[in-house]
Image (cartoon, grey):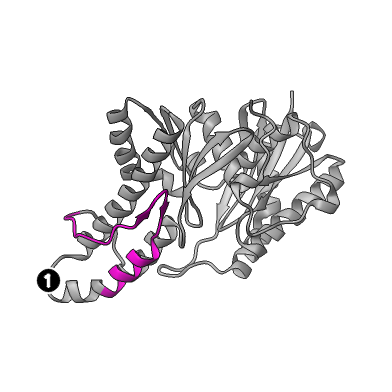
Amino acid sequence: MTVVIGFEGSANKIGVGIVRNGEVLSNPRRTYITPPGQGFLPSETARHHRSVILTVLKEALEEAGLKPADIDCVAYTKGPGMGAPLVTVALVARTVAQLWGKPLLGVNHCIGHIEMVRLITQANNPTVLYVSGGNTQVIAYSERRYRIFGETIDIAVGNCLDRFARVIKVIMLLHYVELPYTVKGMDVSFSGILSYIEEAAGKMLKCNQCTAEDLCFSLQETLFSMLVEITERAMAHCSSQEVLIVGGVGCNLRLQEMMGVMCKERGAKLFATDESFCIDNGAMIAQAGWEMFRSGQTTELSDSWITQRYRTDEVEVTWRD
């Protein structure tokens, strides 16, 4: 049986997971948490990852009940993500692979999300909505590639929600306020909506036109409606009867509810999971690495670099028909 250990640390989560033939043996992680209202900087995030990664590695091995000799391959996140945290994780993965005498494998972060949730939900060939703090894509598999059918042309949906949350400082749901709705073919744009609501929020609240809770609710409803629309369009194009939501924003129950309504109307199935596997974790890199390693892929030490820009459709999917 093939055992793969995966290292993930492309943003503020650092995780190490171990997978054996489709079974998650361990998946500990840590989160770099900043003061309320502040984002996380690459250098400080990398410093956090360096301080805990060996502890998390030890936990992963102990929880799985394995020793380094039991590992067949070491996988790590090659990209996309924040440069400094990615370098930290790649450095540890390279070192571990050499110390243990194991092959190394660089994994695309998005494909890690897809393969992990495909494993957990047993979705067959779904249209994928990938939504997180740094990415927003609608994806479908075709001819050995995860093809991107639509994506954000500016900021990601998670980034849009986070930035407005810092401005408004509450997250509660009440009454809908009409906001700009920007779908361009198969793509979406969030930066204009964010600029509009950031500028309008102060005036609306001062004039008692709405509450802060109304604005939070309205922004979420508008963004998620846009995502459901382009996902449904991709389903129609691919004649798909399955939707798979992956990425950190995929934990959002309201997004799952709205997507579920659309799927029900089309007679389709929705597959989603909770924060255990939606949010960045080491097991997702291990699972994608497991698939890649079994299909004959490895990464030479000289090619084990990282990249902040690594599109989903750049990867040849050698493990699917």
Residue on which disc 1 sits = 208
Q: Is residue 32 left or right of residue 300?
A: left
Taking the spot 51% from the left edge, 25% from the top edge, the residue there is: 124
Q: Position of residue 126 (x, y in %)?
A: 48, 31
Q: Which range of residues does the magenta coloring cover?
A: 174-199
Q: Nearer the viewer, residue 240 or 208?
A: 240
Q: Nearer the viewer, residue 162 or 28?
A: 162
Q: Is residue 15 left or right of residue 278?
A: right
Say above or below: 42 vs 255.
below
Residue 47 shows in the view: yes
Say above or below: 111 vs 84.
above
Residue, far top:
1
Q: Position of residue 59 (x, y in %)?
A: 66, 43
Identify residue type, mark 1: Asn
Query: Image quarter for residue 203?
Result: bottom left
Quadrant of image for the C terminus: top right
Residue, far left:
208
Secondary structure beneath dot 1 equals loop
Residue 272 shows in the view: no
Residue 180: in magenta span: yes
